[in-house]
Amino acid sequence: MKIAVSSIGTDLDSEIDPRFGRCAYFIIVNPDDMTFEAIENESMSLGGGAGIQSGQFIASTGAKVLITGNVGPNASRTLNAAGLDVIVGVSGPVREAIERYEKGEFSPTNQASVPDHFGMGGGQGSYPGGGMGMGQGMGRGMGMQGGYAPPQAPSPASPDQELGALKADATALREQLNSILSRIKDLE
C-alpha cells in the first residue's frame, strides 16, 4: 500500500506542507520498507482547480492514503471519489507522520478542513475571504441560484498552522526563485 504526503521538501525528514492542492511536493511512501518517491506538485501554481488536479494526480499514483495539513472541498470530493483515506490536521516531519499512521494514531475524514481557495492567499489578502483580487473568484456570485452570495472568510488558522503555511510558502517561493535564476543564468 502506498501513502501520499504533502511536503515542503523532497525527503522523509521534510515537514508536511499544510496545503494539499498547492503543496510544493508529494512524497509517495511504501511504509513496508520506507522507500519513497518525491514528486514536484505541478498544480502548485494553477490559477484555479489545484485541489482537483492534485487529487486526480494522487489517485493516479496508486496511493490509498493521503496525509496532509488541510484539504479544500473540491480536493476532498475528488479524493473521496477515488477511494482514498484522507488524514488532515497533520504537521511535523513526513517520516513521523507515516510512523504515527502505521501505529493507528490517525482517523480518515471525508470532509474538507478549509474553505475553497484557502491555499491561494492563506486568508491574508485585502479582499473578503483572503482573495488576491485577480479575477479568480470564477463568477460564483451569480451562480445557479441567481442571488448574490457574499464570500466566506476562511476559518482562522492557529498560529502554528499559519507559521507552517508561511514557512511552506517561503520554501516554495525560494525554490521557485532559484529555478528561475538558474534558468536565467543558463539563457545568458
Image: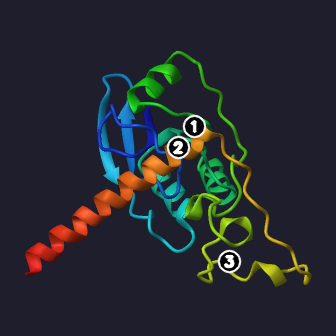
Mark 2 and mark 1 residues within 8 Å of each other at the beta carbon: yes
As drawn, 117 above or below 24: below
Q: Secondary structure at mark 2?
A: helix
Q: CA distance from mark 2 to mark 3?
A: 26 Å
Residue at 36% across, 22% down: 32
Q: CA distance from mark 2 to mark 1?
A: 5 Å
Please name the amino acid that badge 3 sits on. Gly
The answer, for residue 180, to whether it is visible in the render is: yes
Q: Residues within 10 Å of mark 2 (few under 14, many from 20)?
A: few
Please name the amino acid that badge 1 sits on. Asp
Counting the numbered discs, the total is: 3
- The numbered mark at residue 137 is 3
Q: Secondary structure at mark 3?
A: loop
What residue is disc 1 on?
Answer: 160
Q: Please tell me in which quadrant of the rendered image residue 2 appears.
A: top left
Q: Position of residue 138 (x, y in %)?
A: 67, 80
Q: Quadrant of the C terminus?
A: bottom left
What residue is disc 2 on?
Answer: 163
Mark 2 and mark 3 residues within 8 Å of each other at the beta carbon: no
Q: Position of residue 152 (x, y in %)?
A: 79, 64
The answer, for residue 85, to whether it is visible in the render is: no
| Nearer-N-terminus badge (2/3) | 3
Q: Quadrant of the N terminus?
A: top left
